[in-house]
Image (cartoon, rainbow, N blue to C red):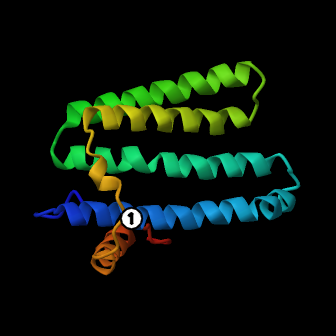
Amino acid sequence: MIQRPVLSREDIRGTFSLMLALTAAIAAFLVVAAPALASSFHEEKLVPYLRLVSVCLFVELVPIQVVTLMRREMAFGKVAMINVAGAATGGAATVALALTGFSYMSFAWAWLASSTVTGVLALALRPDFWMFKPTFKQWRRIAAFGGYNGAIGVPIQGL
């Protein structure tokens, strides 16, 4: 979304829709595969952790979408405010929860707290709820660009 010269509402909604679909697939996999993954690591406590992480993935969709648009608009002060608030919330929650006995789950709960704070703050600074209405009209074009752009960022082994 940042690099496109012209960005329509349909492009923004389509990008969110594609991210939502991919997140749903990953989250569903984590929920369903959690018992098998936990068993393979001989750690049954991994099941609730992975299931909570799948919830965090959904919550994080909101700030990712809004912050990307803010970066496009060069609203870096707002982006910094959101990022600092999220990092401070995540750090404080992790420490507080670990000290109160949440152990490894403190990381997952802190991620949820951080994502929630960044999402609420992002929506408070840019309350454009229309962008979260799914549409798949342009999904091929968006997926093609996103796939190409994502492939560029993949490191090549041995170079």
Question: Along the line of sight, which residue is nearer the eye, 19 or 86?
Answer: 19
Residue 4 in percent (x, y) is at 17, 64
- Whether residue 153 sits left or right of residue 69 in the image: it is right
73 and 58: which is toward the camera: 58
Residue 114 at x, y percent in the picture: 50, 33
Which residue shows up at 42% across the image and 62% down it?
19
State the image quarter where residue 71 is shown: top left
- Regarding mark 1 in the picture, which secondary structure is present there? helix
Q: Which residue carries the number 1 mark?
A: 17
Name the residue furthest left. Answer: 5
Please state which amino acid type lies under the numbered disc 1: Ser
Name the residue: 51% across, 61% down: 23
Q: Residue at x 40, y 34 (%)?
A: 120
- Residue 68, relative to residue 90: is it above or below? below
Number of numbered discs visible in the structure rendering: 1
- Vertical side of 48 occupied by 124: above or below: above
Mark 1: few/some/many CA within 10 Å (<14, 14-19, 20+): many
37 vs 141: above or below: above
Q: Position of residue 128 (x, y in %)?
A: 26, 45
For residue 105, what is the image quadrant? top right
Q: Quadrant of residue 126?
A: top left
Q: Identify which residue is drawn at 33% across, 76% down.
A: 139
Quadrant where the N terminus sits is: bottom left
- Quadrant containing the C terminus is bottom left
Q: Position of residue 72 (x, y in %)?
A: 19, 50
